[in-house]
Structures are given as structure tokens and as C-alpha cells.
Image: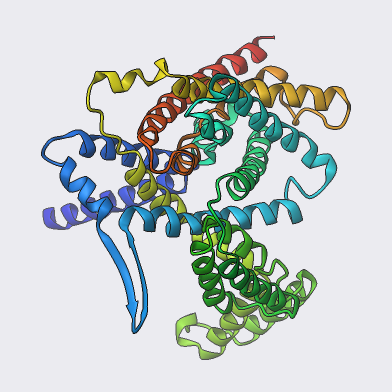
Amino acid sequence: MAKRKRKFRSLRNWYVIRRRGSNFLGSQWAGGAFLVLFSIVALVLANLEATKHAYHHLLETQIGVHINNFRLEMAFEEWVNDALMAIFFFVVGLEIKRGIIAGELSSLKHAALPVAAAIGGMVVPAAIYAVLNGGTEFSAGWGIPMATDIAFAIGILSLLGKRVPLSLKIFLTALAIVDDLGAILVIAIFYTSSINFIMLGIGLAVLGLMFWMNFRGIKPSLLYLIPGITVWFFFLNSGVHSTIAGVLAAMAIPTAPRFSKKYFLYKTKYFIEEFRHTDKPGVPVISNPDQMEVLSKVNFVTNATTSPSQKLEHILNPWVTFLIMPVFAFTNAGVELHSINDLRVLNSTQGLGIFFGLVLGKPLGIFLFCWLTIKAKWAVLPANSTWNMLFGVACLGGIGFTMSIFIDNLAFAGTPWVDTGKIAVLIASVTAAVFGALVINFMVKKDKIH
């Protein structure tokens, strides 16, 4: 009896742990938690005498693909920044496309506020940085404070629960999508090296093939895999940053499902009747081949009513959230601090430009452009929200983190200012996260009192 009770308790504990684990991974703030964890691990490994050499050796380890005369070899850090991040930007492209077709960006009325907010959140920080660094060796970094890390921003907003209206979470998500689009354009136009037009032309030709496949109604996602990888390869060797290939490839993925909603409703109703008629009392479904066949048909129709872009976004999102972005943070946040003076990066115009661009410029730009848009009657405040709440959400836009670090890598590639830029981004992002959470919490309480 005692043995049976112990077994029951262990099974119950395992169930509780599994349920809590599923709840954690399904939460919107879990991605941000993983980013913080991997960033801290990277900082520790990069600064401990016992581990820093091994850490940097890992980043510099050459990994290659050799097939006959074909050879593609890059350091581990380059594979992360140029290959894994291309997948991240592919998912961003799918989100942008979904937002334009069926989301908050699908109509001018819905899109006006987040678009205006994103423009303000890019222009003002870039202007602050440019004023502080124009004509200096740091001038190339003006794009760093323009970016917002959606995982962190949404995660912190979700921690406040129902105190924040759902409309503000939707607004922040739409803002971040437009912000990502702006960052992609900045990378493509301003942070692209010399271009090999032959390689670029071949890449664009293969991309054209993908759009043709979409136009011809070719739906299976796997058929777009090899062309997508080919586009990435030629963009990688063209001088245009390879992550742009991820966004463009996403635009070629079909958004129209094979079956319509009307057909799905008709067929599932028919299948339910068929399932009922093939039922055998006392026989479980798994032992009833007729019912198993019906379930297979239901599964087929359900999958065919989901668009390829929806399927890919659903499949890739967990991988991006819990693998690609944490690995990127682990690879890029490991800044070696040689002395306490390295923490005084805010004494330089580079550090001040990044810090004030993110912590001050982002919320001011977002809030000011929202105010102008609403006063011009082109948009309205999100439902059940107030100006106070909107300003609190705008403060979270200053969490640049992964996106800002990514642009920092491009802006200061091959210079000693890459690491100082990363330190400034980390300090500014932590400040913006804490300040934004406190402001939102205070503003929500203030609005409830009034």
C-alpha cells in the first residue's frame, strides 16, 4: 500500500511539473526570460578566466558544408547571425504579411496608429543619436536605437496581466511588426556592403520562381524549402545582408488555403454524421477502422484549410522563441569587460546616443506621433485605454536588445566599437524595461483611482 501511494505521489508530482512547464512555455513572457538567461550566461562565460577562452573559441569554430567542389564554411557566430537570423526574419516576414492581409495592418483605420507610432519610434531615436554623433567615428550607429525587441516588450506587458487592456497589447504587437519592417528596410538600404549584382540577380530570379509557384497555386510548404535556401545562399554571397532573403522569401509563401471556410464547414458536418453512423457500441475508436478513416479525413481537410504561411509561422515560432533568439543572445551578449571603465560607456557619445535614443527617444517618438495622429482624427485611442496607459506602453518600445545588437553588429563590423555598442544596448534595454514596467503599473493604478 505504501509503495502504491509513493508511486501515485510521484506520478502526481510529475503531472504538476509537466503542466507548469507547459504553462511557462506557453506564456508570452517565457521568450524574454530565456533571452535574459542566455545573455547572463554569455556575459559570465565571457568574463571568467576559466571559461572565456573556451567561449570565444566556440564562437570562432569553423563549421562548413563540403559537397564535391562546393564549399560553404563560416564561423559558428556567423552561422548564427547570417543563417539562424535569416529564419528569424523569415518568421518576421510571415508576421508582417499576416498583419497586412488579415491583422491590425489590414485597413487604414486600424493601421494608422501603429504605423505612426512606429515611424515616430524610429525617427526620433535616430535623430537623437545623429545629433550626438554626427561627423564622429560613431555616426554609422544611428540605426541601433531604432529597433524594438518584441519578445521582451510583449513579455513585460503580459506580466501585468488583465490590468492592461487587450487593445494595448494588440497595438504594441502591430507597432513592433511595423518597427521590424522599418528595421529591415534600414538594414537593406543603409547596412549593405558592396553588391555582387550577378549573385543578387540569381537570388532574385529564384525568388521570382517562388512567387510564380505561389501564383500557380502550389501549396505544399516543403516545395518552397529548397528555393528559399537557394535565395538565402545567393543573397549571402551578393553583399545584401542574407536576413533580407528571409523576409522576401516569406512574402512568397501562400496565404490562401487549399480549401475555403465554406467547404470546411460542409465537409466536417458530413464527416461528423459519417463518424456517428460508423460507431460500434463498446468498440473504442482505435479499434474501429471506419472511424479512424473518418478522423484521417477530418485531419486532412483541417490541414488543407490552414494556409501554408499560417502553418509555417505556427511551426517555427517556438523554435525562434526558445532556440534561435536565445542562441543569438548567447553568441552576441558575451561582451568581455576588461575593467570597470568598460561599464562607463555612457561617457562616450556612442553610448549616450544609444541610451537616450532608446530610453528617451523611443517613448517620446511613439507617444508624440500617436498624439498627432489621433488629434488629426486619423485614428483613435485603443479601446478601454487612456493616454497614461499609452505612454507607459510607449516606454517599453525602448527595449532594443536583440534587434539593436543585431544592427550594432552591422554598423560597427570590424571595429572595436561593436562591444561598447552592445554594452550600451544592454544598459539601455534593462533601463527601458524597468522604467516601462513601473510607468505602466503606476499609470494603470492612477487611471483606476480617477
Tell me: residue 234, above or below residue 34. Answer: below
Residue at x 66% of width, y 52% of height? 96
Tell me: residue 392, above or below residue 149. Answer: above
Q: Quadrant of the C terminus?
A: top right
Question: Which residue extends farthest top?
Answer: 450
Residue at x 29% of width, y 64% of height? 63
Q: Residue 190 falls in which quadrant of the image?
A: top right
Q: Residue 24 falls in which quadrant of the image?
A: top left
Q: Is residue 323 left or right of residue 443?
A: left
**Along the viewing direction, whichever of 429 and 80 lies nearer the viewer:** 80
**Along the viewing direction, whichever of 127 and 286 lies nearer the viewer:** 127
Measured from the top left, where is residue 49 in percent x and y? 12, 35
Measured from the top left, where is residue 251 in percent x and y? 67, 62
Question: Which residue extends farthest bottom?
Answer: 289
Count how many numbered circles sit on residues in the image. 0
Measured from the top left, where is residue 416 in percent x and y? 35, 34
Q: How is the image coloured?
A: rainbow
Question: Which residue extends farthest right?
Answer: 377
Q: Is residue 2 left or right of residue 104?
A: left
Residue at x 75% of width, y 26% of height? 370
**Along the viewing direction, whichever of 328 and 391 lies nearer the viewer:** 328
Q: Residue 330 falls in which quadrant of the image?
A: top left
Measured from the top left, where is residue 170 in percent x and y? 66, 39
Q: Is residue 171 visible?
A: yes
**Along the viewing direction, whichever of 307 and 409 lies nearer the viewer:** 409
Q: Quadrant of the N terminus?
A: bottom left
Q: Is residue 436 visible?
A: no
Tell me: residue 408, above or below residue 4. Answer: above
Tell me: residue 365, above or below residue 44. Answer: above
